[in-house]
Image: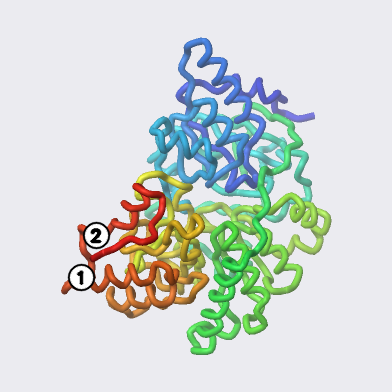
Amino acid sequence: MSRYPILTAEEAASLIQHDDNIGFSGFTPAGAAKAIPKAIAARARVEHAAGRPFKIGIATGASTGDSLDGELARADAVKWRTPYQSNKDMRKGINEGRIHFFDMHLSQVPQYVDYGFLGRFNWAIVEATEVTPDGKIIPTTSVGASPTFLRYADKILIEVNAAHPKSLRGIHDIYTLGRIPNRREIPIYKANDRIGEEFIRVDPYKIAGIVYTNLPDESGGFDPIDETTRKIGENVAKFLVGEMAMGRIPSEFLPIQSGVGNIANAVLSSLSENPEIPPFMMYSEVIQDSVIAAMKSGGITFASGTSLTISPAIQKEVYDNFDFFRSKFLLRPQELSNNPEVARRLGVVSVNTALETDIFGNVNSTHVLGKDIMNGIGGSGDFTRSAFISIFTCPSVAKGGKISTIVPTCSHNDHSEHSVQILITENGIADLRAKSPGERARAIVENCSHPEYRDALHSFFNSVKGGQTPQTLGRAFRMHEQYAATGDMRGVHFD
């Protein structure tokens, strides 16, 4: 018999008040709370119909599933949101100004909560496979910022989800950083070092109730690898093999960090399948489908992350063969998985995806035309500034060629030229290390840009006389302006 009240999702939602701030579990849809946020959204609709205000502040580990971000956004129940999102309805509310969103480096979220930068948290609502009578919580498929939310929230609600087996206990590595100014180094010296406990400890008297569910993660699959993503992946592998040949990467290789998505999936597949790259470890945020495939083939020996974000079919395979996979990954709090100190010490090679990049090596990860948010910076900044080698990838064009992802000047800047070392598209590789702005521009245009835009980018560069950075303010956004006016960047002139 549980010592905690057993509630329905609707009973749990009735405890939430207008203006409450809530920390939810979830890092991607993996491990996100589902039943209670959906019930909170239903309650918000009832309150709004009665003419009463009802909005909550939402912090999570990263993005979540539709039952959380989507339902609450559609119910107009969100007053603010951080640190990252990828839901179309949440994005719409943000870009229309109805939802206040502040984009954050994911490693910083726990510290912001820890020191009160985000205010008081009334609730933590998390998903678990199990809760013990003495307050030990075993998460499901992600850890994210849940340990911090649970520590500082006034009250706790837990969704115990039978869709995930109790055998997940043991794959989590929960470790708490000390408080500034007495914080010590994090004792992770290899990606597979375990340093913490397999559960999150909480005060059991803070647990206001448990909701039992049986709801799968809302993670979708990835698109099949196409010709463009395949070439990008092959170019990343080619570059890293060259670095090994030059003696800049040791023969045993280095840990890889990878962003999430179709390009990242293709890159990891290419690395693990390349016969010149030895089996390697990952020190990253997200363990995705291609990582599981590479574990099976032996290309990846171990992965440290904060979420297991895999498609339903792959998740079933992992659960059905858990004796094999159990020793091959750990899920840690995001203040560990994304920690810049650890990434710098381990010599992580970071591979992230750019929305657009300019000819000088600045990268925009977040905004369309400098105005509308897409998803957020996520963890790319955590790793880019601290990586042994930082790589950004992107296709050279988007929208069927109507957009060049390589432009004279980024419409929004998330990663500066000082942090971006390598740019790779399907067309080639631009090594930006130890190059002046003019040299970087030539390398990017010649090696990475799409042939249809190459002359235009050259004409921009050549039209500038003098200066350390060959830039002209009056023409810097001409490609963006043309796209905003016509829906197509092609044919732009810089004469």
Q: Which mark is residue 475?
A: 2
Of the image marks 1 and 2, the number of the one nearer the N terminus: 1
Where residue 219 sits: x, y (%)?
66, 47
Whether residue 40 sits left or right of residue 446 in the image: it is right
Q: CA distance from mark 1 to mark 2?
A: 10 Å
- Say the numbered circle drawn on residue 464: 1
Q: Residues within 10 Å of mark 1 (few under 14, many from 20)?
A: few
- Element type at marker 1? loop
On the picture, is 64 further left or further right than 495?
Answer: right
Residue at x 68% of width, y 54% of height: 310
Q: Quadrant of residue 225?
A: bottom right
As drawn, the label of residue 203 is none
Above or below, 26 relative to 409: above
Quadrant for the C terminus, please.
bottom left
- Image height of 433 relative to 416, above or below: below
Instruction: Pinpoint residue 379: horizontal percent, then vertical percent.
Output: 48, 56
What is the secondary structure assignment of the residue under circle 2? loop
Residue 110 visible in the displayed image:
no
Q: Residue furthest bottom?
A: 246
Callout 2 environment at 10 Å: few (<14), some (14 to 19), or many (20+)? some
Residue 460 higher or lower than 2, as above or below: below
| Near-viewer residue (10 or 63) | 63
Q: Quadrant of residue 115?
A: top left
What quarter of the picture does the N terminus occupy? top right
Query: What residue is rendered at 65% in x and 79% in y?
Result: 274
Whether residue 256 sits left or right of residue 197 in the image: it is left
Give percent across and percent down for residue 370.
35, 49
- The amino acid type of the residue labelled 2 equals Arg
User: Between residues 89 and 421, which one lies in front from this camera angle?
Assistant: 89
